[in-house]
Image (cartoon, grey):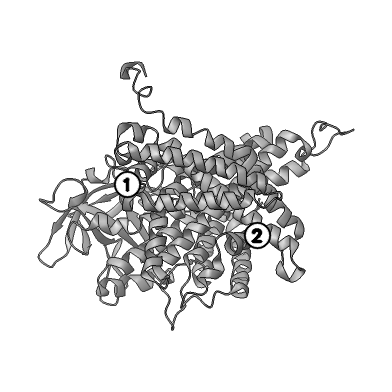
Amino acid sequence: MNDYIAPLDHLRFALEHVADFSRLTQVPGFEVWNADTTRRWLASAGRFFADVWAPTNQPADRAGAFLEQGRVVVYPPFADVYRQTMEGGWNVLPRHPSPQEPGIPWMVHAVGIELMASSNGSFSMLTGLIAGAIELLELHASPEQQAQYVPKLRSGEWAGAMDLSEPEAGSDLGALRTKAVLQADGSYRLFGSKRFISWADHDLTPNIVHLVLARTPNAPAGTAGISCFIVPKFLPDAQGSPGVRNDIHCAKVERNMGFRASPTCMMQLGDAGGAVGYLIGKEGDGMRIMFTMMNSNRLATALGAMGIAERAYQAACAYTRLRVQGVPPGAARGAPIVHHPDVRRMLMTMRCHIDGMRALCYFLAGCFDMASHAPSPSERQHYQALADLLTPVAKSWCTEVGSEVTSLAIQLHGGSGFVEDTGVAQHYRDIRIMSIFEGTNGIQAQDLVARKLARNDAEPVRQLLERLSAQAAAAQQSGDVLSASGRALAHATDCLRTATDWMLAQSQGTSRDAISGACAYQRLFGAVVVASLLLRGAQSAGELLNGSDSDKPGYNPRFLQARTASAGFFAEQVLPLFVAWASPAMAGCDTLFSTPEEWL
C-alpha cells in the first residue's frame, strides 16, 4: 500500500519562509536555484520518490535481506529502483559551486533526504552511504584515489559502505581492534571484524567501496591511533574494473527490528591472508577524517527520522478521516474519529512536531551552506558556530519526537495499528534506530553541554538566546494572534537561559551534575529553537494571507491558516511540556546515584 504523497506545500514553505532559502540563492554559484527552479525540482523529486520508491516500502520490509550461500540478497525490485535513481541523478549530493557547475545546496539535499526516508527508509540508507563515501573521498583522499573511485560512486556503478563499529567498540571507536599492517608496496593488509555495518554487502552493484577504520601496529591507544582505509570488495584491475575478490566478506546479516530491507552486516576482514586496503591521508588521521562528516551525518539522521514521521502522520490522518466510531461531543450521530477532541489533539501534536522538525533541519542545512559559501569570513565563522551548536540538538530532538509521532500513529489506528497490515507498525520499527545512529542521543547531549556550549566563551549560545528573546518581544508587541506564541517563547527562552547559565557554571558543562542533566537540557533547547522557527513561519503565513494573491503563489489560504494554527498549538500546548525539562536539567546527580548499583 502506498500511503505517501510528497507534501510539496510544506517543503516549499519551510524552505522559502522559515529557512530563508532566497538568501542562499544570492551566493555565487547558487543563483540557478531561484524560486521557479526550486519548485520544479521539488515537484519532480516528489513525483519520483512517491511513485518509484514509496510502493516498495512495505513489500521490501516483508521480504527482508538475507545471506544465502555467502551472497547477500536484497529485495529484487530494488535493482530497477536503484537503476532509475542513478540514471535520473536523484542521489542528490551537495557540492561546491563553480561558474562551470552550479552546486546543489545542502538545503536542497536535505529535501531529497526527507523524500527518500519517507518513501523507503531502508533503501535511503544505501544512497546516503554512497553520498557519504563521495564526501569523504573528495575531502581527504589523494587525487589518484579520487580519480579511481569517486566517478564510479557518483554514477552509482559502485556503492559505498562505512565500516566503523566493532563487536566490542560501538560508540567508543577508540576501543576498536581491527589491525592494518603496512606492506612493501605501500598498501596495507587489514584483519578484524566489523559489526552493524549497513549495506556492507548486497547484489545491486558489481563492487562496493568500504571505508574502514583500523589501527596500525604500535599506534597510540584510543582515537589518536585510528587510521582510515579504502578497502574495495573487488580490487580494481588495470582498466579500473572489478578484478580479484578482496579478503572481506559478510559473515552474518542481522535480524533487524526495523529497516529489515537494509542488510545490516557482520563483516570479516583478513580470514585468508589480509584484506587489501589503501590509506587515506596519514596514519592516525582516521577520526579527524570521519569527524569532518559527523555534522552532515547527524543532520541526515534527523532528516531521516522526520521523513518517516511524516509518512506515519499521513497514514494516521487518512485513517482518522475514514474510521467511524463513537459520537463526538456535541454531535447527534457517529462520525469519523477525526472529530473527537483527543484524536484531534494527537493529530495536532504530530503535525506541529513534524513542522518543527522540518523547520529545524532545513534551517540547520542552511547554516551548513552559509558556513561553506557565505561571502565573508565572519559570516562563515558565524554560521559554522551555529551549525556546531545546533547539530547535536537537531539529531537528538528530531529522532526522539519522531519516535513519539510514529507511536501516536499507532495509537490513532487503534488495534489496527498494532498489526502489520496497515504499515504504521513498520514506521515505528524503522524510526527507533535513529536515536542510536551516529552517536546515541545521550552522547549528543554530552557533546552539547561539555563541548559546544562553552566554545568561543559561550558567545554562540549567548547570541542565539538574545535573538530568541528579541523575536519573542516583537511577537508580543504585535497585538495579533501571535502575541500568545510570543509570550510562550519568551518564558521558554528565559528558562533555557537559566538552564544554560547553570550548565556553564558546572565546570563549563563537564561535571557529573551537568552530564546528568544533559538529555533534559537538550530536549528543552530543541523545543525552544523549534518554537522560534514555527513562530517565524506563522509570521510569514500571516503576511502572505494579508497580501495580494500574487504574494502567495500556489499557497491555499487554508494551508497558511493551518501554519499559524500549528505554531500556536505548539507554543500553547506542547512547549510548556518541554519547558518542564528545565527542572531535571538542573537537578544534579544525587538522586541518580542514591540507589546502590545492586538494587537497580
For the question of whether residue 306 can be seen, the reply is no
Please provide percent x and percent y for residue 384. 38, 60
Mark number displayed over residue 498: none
For the question of whether residue 326 can be seen, the reply is yes
Element marked by disc 1: helix
Where is residue 94, by image quadrant? bottom left
Question: Where is mark 1, residue-wise?
Answer: 451
In the displayed structure, does residue 271 sit left or right of residue 323? Answer: left
- Quarter of the image with the C terminus in it: top left
Label 2 and label 1: CA atoms lie apart by: 34 Å
Viewer-closest of 435 and 500: 500
Residue projecting furthest to the front: 477
The amino acid on which the numbered mark 2 sits, given as a three-letter code, is Ser
In the displayed structure, does residue 454 sit left or right of residue 549? Answer: left
Please provide percent x and percent y for residue 162. 34, 55
In the displayed structure, does residue 35 sit left or right of residue 75? Answer: right
Element marked by disc 2: helix
The amino acid on which the numbered mark 1 sits, given as a three-letter code, is Arg
Mark number displayed over residue 540: 2
Where is residue 53, by image quadrant? bottom right
Residue projecting furthest to the bottom: 100
Please provide percent x and percent y for residue 74. 47, 53
